Image (tube, rainbow, N blue to C red):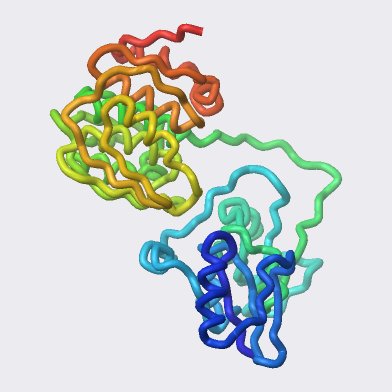
Amino acid sequence: MLTLALPKGRLLDPAITLLAELGIRGIDPDSRRLLQADDAAGLRFILLKPADVPTYVEYGAADLGIVGKDILLEQQPDVYEPVDLGFGFCWLVVAETRELWERDDPAKWSWVRVATKYPRLTEYYFSERGIQVEMVRLDGSIELAPLVGLAERIEIAGVPELGGARHRVIPDRIEAGTLLVAAAITGGDVTVVGADPRHMSAMLSKLEECGAAVTVTDDRIRCQGPARPKAADIITSPFPGFPTDMQAQFMAMLGLADGISKITETIFENRFMHAAELSRMGARIEAEGSIAVVRGVRYYQGAPVMATDLRASASLVLAGLAARGGTEVSRVYHLDRGYERLEVKLRALGAIIDRVK
């Protein structure tokens, strides 16, 4: 039986239409079943998150896959790592072993391939036990992996008591990146201390592409903004690619760039809501679906704007820093979900900014 991987969401209906034109009609889009079959046609269908379709085909869990062109062109398996959102259960999925191992003796697991939504936690768990791991990184179609032969699931059993440990929380690369963009959008000079440049390679290289001078010394990152940013194209992707949580901030900067920029959002849908608010300040942005085209203008004009989410609020603050006249950003409670006293830090850098209420 031939297995066909199909994308869930907005791409499913076009895929079903395409198959219907070929005489294949065994798919029920309204069913909650993610694994369906047309025995007469000798076909099995698995419904996955779009980003997981190439992974299932690559590892042989599906013979063929239908997915949007943007996924095929932009997904790079060598840099693909979905973001751990920090909620829900973490399932570790073992897809293959090269030596026999016993479930009750992890020391005998010398090599495993693991399919997981949480690659960092998974890698840490096995590396602490001296086990070499190859990761199959999925965006969320974990529940299907055992059903189609991609993986055999094991559950990690808890212990009665955990021992103490010392752990240093990693720096917030998004807050650090926001402060660096503040320098780039205003032509300023900002040094961020305590950040880890290894976590920020994609955004640092993009800042340099936009004309900023970036200097890295150990845990100090200095950004000297250009007189006017250069246009650049951005495609968001999971770590270590360009983070979706920096997309809005870069859009604010590219709105003042010399030239036309294209931003492609591959992680979340409807994440260009800040474009309309930036347009109130004079930005020229055309957003449709997952793509936004930004035509740079010479300056922003201050205006009352409204934050729609966490990163959108940061982008409006940055735009206000570079705008002529005053800007008032409402609903800044969004901002406080991801930044600690951002206005105080910006004021320390010389910005004229106050929290009204």
On screen, residue 277 versus residue 15, left or right, reads left
Residue 211 at least partly seen: no
Q: Position of residue 35 (x, y in %)?
A: 70, 74
As rendered, which of 135 and 38 lies closer to the eye?
38
Q: Position of residue 10 (x, y in %)?
A: 54, 60
Q: Residue drawn at (16%, 43%), measured in percent from left and top?
A: 259
Q: Residue drawn at (30%, 26%), measured in percent from left and top?
A: 182
As rendered, which of 56 and 173 lies closer to the eye?
56
As drawn, 58 above or below 341? below
Q: Residue drawn at (64%, 87%), measured in percent from left and top?
A: 43
On screen, residue 328 versus residue 141, left or right, reads left
As rendered, which of 97 and 292 lies closer to the eye?
292
On screen, residue 149 versus residue 170, left or right, reads right
As drawn, 133 above or below 264? below
Residue 303 at least partly seen: yes
Res. 62 image quadrant: bottom right
Which quarter of the rendering shows the N terminus?
bottom right
Disc tally is 0
Q: Position of residue 219 (x, y in %)?
A: 36, 33
Q: Residue furthest right?
A: 160
As rendered, which of 226 and 199 lies closer to the eye?
226
Q: Position of residue 183 (x, y in %)?
A: 26, 26
Q: Residue drawn at (31%, 31%), measured in percent from left and top?
A: 181
